[in-house]
């Protein structure tokens, strides 16, 4: 039976968060809470994107409620409720991205006098209402001040956490869906968001830009370091390389740490060896045993 091969090292797809997650250990000694928050930045964003994808698949079903109403004179609106439940979770997941980012900010700025440490809303308010001390990076302060989407997202997260799902309906004869919630008000009126899928997509893009700006600054502070990087699982074994933090990081970066054994073990040669710079760099038979 041929064993499956899985390539896990794909730096061409890395974000600023991925780079920081890989190399931050050479500069920071994070506790378990911060490490969990750091992984949460990526995981919550990925979940939000997954939910947007699910909502897009459910969107055509919303019009079925109107068809049922027109043909039978009533509708339970179940399709709209299912769509609403999914799209609302997009906003709560996106807020979790911001919340996890705040926890990493706090962990890296422990000596910043006066900085709120236990609340995302307090940190944003502290940054936006006054000048921050010199120990708080202006790059991060600017990212927070430019986050004009934050107040609405905070309000939505707070309200949707404790309320029933909202209502959705197809706009006219088009394919856009309007979202409303009578338990959530805006300017004294029930909240209405036209083209809720477009709104969610735009918000996700803005939060991605915010997170990228914050972690780009974090990465600028990192000391040079090296890590043991898993390249993938090939032929039933794990293959590693020693990876320096020098940018740009590509699939050719670093030094192979597995050829010391796979060059001398018939049938286990790395499938990428002939095209891998990390393998060429160390030279056949010169790598240290992993």
Image (tube, helix red, strand yellow):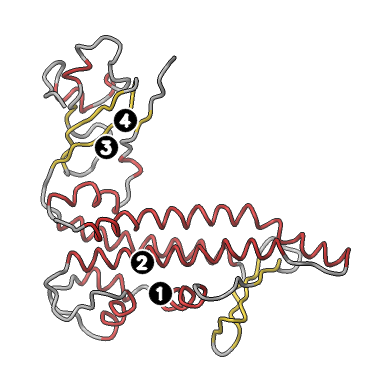
Spatial distance from mark 3 to mark 1, Cα to Cα?
Answer: 34 Å
Does residue 23 appear to the left or right of 63 in the view shown? left
Q: Of label 3 and label 4, which has the lower sequence position?
A: 4
Mark earlier in primary sequence (3, 2):
2
Mark 4, residue position: 232
Mark linked to residue 250: 3
Select label 2 or label 1 by which is in front: 2
Q: Earlier in the sequence, mark 2 or mark 4?
A: 2
- Asked if the residue at tag 1 contacts the one at tag 3, i.e. Cβ–Cβ closer than 8 Å, the answer is no
In this rendering, position of residue 161 left or right of residue 166:
left
How far apart marks 2 and 4 lie (CA) works out to 31 Å
Question: Disc 4 versus disc 1: distance between alpha carbons?
Answer: 39 Å
Residue tagged by mark 2? 98
- Neighbor class of circle 4 (other Cα within 10 Å; few <14, some 14-19, many 20+) is some
Q: Is the residue under label 1 in contact with that under label 2 (CB below 8 Å)? A: yes
Where is residue 197 shown, x and y percent of the image? 58, 62
- Tell me the residue at 36%/54% (across/down): 42
Q: Quadrant of residue 270?
A: top left
Which residue position holds label 1? 150
Residue 247: x, y in percent? 20, 44
Task: Give the camera-side residue of 183 and 108.
Answer: 183
Above or below 11: residue 174: below
């Amino acid at each position: 039976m041929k064993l499956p091969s899985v390539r896990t090292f794909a730096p061409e797809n890395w974000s600023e968060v991925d780079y920081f997650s890989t190399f931050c250990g050479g500069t920071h000694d994070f506790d378990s809470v911060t490490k969990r928050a750091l992984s949460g930045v990526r995981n919550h964003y990925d979940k939000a994107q997954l939910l947007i994808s699910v909502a897009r698949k459910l969107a055509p079903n919303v019009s079925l409620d109107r068809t049922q109403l027109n043909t039978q004179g009533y509708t339970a609106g179940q399709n709209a409720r299912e769509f609403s439940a999914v799209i609302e979770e997009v906003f709560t997941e996106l807020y979790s991205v911001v919340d996890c980012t705040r926890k990493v900010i706090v962990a890296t700025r422990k000596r910043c006098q006066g900085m709120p440490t236990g609340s995302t809303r307090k940190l944003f308010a502290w940054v936006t209402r006054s000048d921050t001390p010199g120990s708080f990076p202006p790059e991060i302060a600017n990212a927070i001040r430019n986050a004009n989407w934050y107040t609405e997202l905070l309000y939505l997260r707070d309200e949707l956490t404790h309320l029933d799902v909202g209502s959705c309906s197809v706009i006219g004869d088009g394919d856009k869906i309007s979202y409303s919630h009578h338990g959530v008000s805006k300017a004294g009126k029930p909240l209405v968001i036209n083209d809720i899928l477009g709104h969610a997509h735009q918000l996700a893009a803005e939060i991605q830009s915010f997170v990228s700006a914050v972690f780009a600054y974090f990465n600028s502070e990192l000391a040079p370091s090296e890590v043991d990087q898993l390249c993938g699982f090939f032929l039933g074994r794990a293959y590693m390389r020693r990876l320096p933090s020098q940018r740009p990081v590509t699939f050719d970066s670093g030094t192979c740490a597995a050829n010391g054994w796979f060059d001398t073990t018939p049938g286990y040669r790395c499938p990428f060896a002939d095209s891998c710079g990390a393998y060429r760099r160390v030279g056949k038979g010169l790598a240290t045993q992993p």
